[in-house]
Image: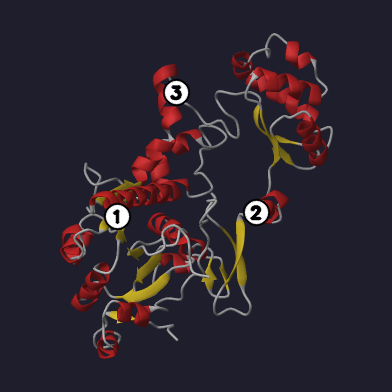
Amino acid sequence: MSDQRPLRGIRVLDLSTVVAGPFSTMILSDLGAEVIKIERIDGGDDSRGMGPHHAGWGAMFVPLNRGKRSIAINVTNPAGRDAVLKLASTCDVYVENFRGGKAVQLGLDEAAVRAHAPNIIYASMSAFGTTGPDVLKPGYDGLIQGRTGIMSITGADSDAIARAGVSVIDMSAGMWLSMGVLSALYERKQSGRGQRVDASLLQSGIMLMAYHLLYRQFAGENPVPQGSGHSSFAPYGAFHTADGRIMIGVSNDRVFKRFCLAMERPDWAIDPRFVTNVLRAQNRPVLDSEIQARFLTAGLGHWTAVLDKHDVPVSPIQTAEEVLADPQVAAVGQLQLVDLPGGDHASALIPRLPFSLSVNAPAIGGPPPRLGEHGRDILRDAGYTDAQIVELLSADQFAAAAPHEK
């Protein structure tokens, strides 16, 4: 059966590396676009080396690059640069995350690309945006979590601030870039015009901080780390049970009354300190202490069942192993088993895009590529003859390499 995913027929040239850019092009790939990944000849994308590894595959590289095609090119060589521009002329979208003026220095900037592909969507990912005093500075997820204030509100207290355990900045920036690309593709379909799309880690972090920035303006004070809690709701957070950890979320007074019945503490519901959410938030330490003592009287399974029965939002705090075995995760099909080439029957469960379409659903289009695996086919599709390909891939030219090509 032919591929009927929504972006079928769209071709993307991806020069981005590590997380944010590849996450964006992974979204486009799962939506059906053909993504050609340009990699360095000396090891490829840095994320290939980020462990742990299984059957030669890195845990960072695999989920971000599934379903893509790889060609290894030395873009600092004129022949390599020309190959990239020739490939760009066959594509709808060009994605890069070069730092500062590197794209201009390489001759792979928007003007150079658009000279070969006037109506292409040129998408650029950066750390700090395209203007301003920090435009040339390097930036990574953790650094931007600090810069945008996210780390100031993450952790147990102000002396134990923490980076969020997942790459929220990189991944959110990748989502914004892919949304921009989709918007630009729709506009081009209407007008025929290509355009530039820019996204940055800094701007994505500021967007994630929206509530907390308004908190500072409205409350007149900086928000502080809440641990697993929330400054606006109580009780809300993680607690220990007799045999595990549990997370509850009580968002209003109606839910709190049900919570009190479930916990067999109806007195909490009429306690003057706890009768409204505002009062509960003000008296959070006392309330949390009483709740914690009650939770320790029984195990996780008991409390989860009781709170579920009373329609109180509750969740066990699961490990990665438990998530992989979660029946609800299985029921919604959020993990897809993908075979990993080259291994001894190696495979991995990889998260698919977390939304569905009723007509042409997105799907993981295949395994991640070996470095340079599709080099010859990609060059051939771009119009290179077999003789030219041999010359490009020769050691003398050092413009492109396909070390794992069959």
Residue 127 visible in rendering? no
Q: Earlier in the sequence, mark 1 or mark 2?
A: 1
**Where is mark 1, residue-wise?**
123
Determine whether, in the image, residue 391 is placed left or right of residue 155: left
Determine whether, in the image, residue 6 is placed left or right of residue 104: right
Mark number, residue 158: none
Find residue 390 and report its image quarter.
bottom left
Residue at left offset 55%, top offset 32%: 157
**What is the tally of numbered marks visible in this picture?**
3
**Where is mark 3, residue-wise?**
215
Q: Between residues 158 and 130, which one lies in front from this camera angle?
A: 130
Q: Position of residue 248 (x, y in %)?
A: 68, 32
Q: Position of residue 310 (x, y in %)?
A: 77, 28
Q: Secondary structure at mark 1?
A: strand
Q: Between residues 142 and 246, which one lies in front from this camera angle?
A: 246
Q: Earlier in the sequence, mark 2 or mark 3?
A: 3
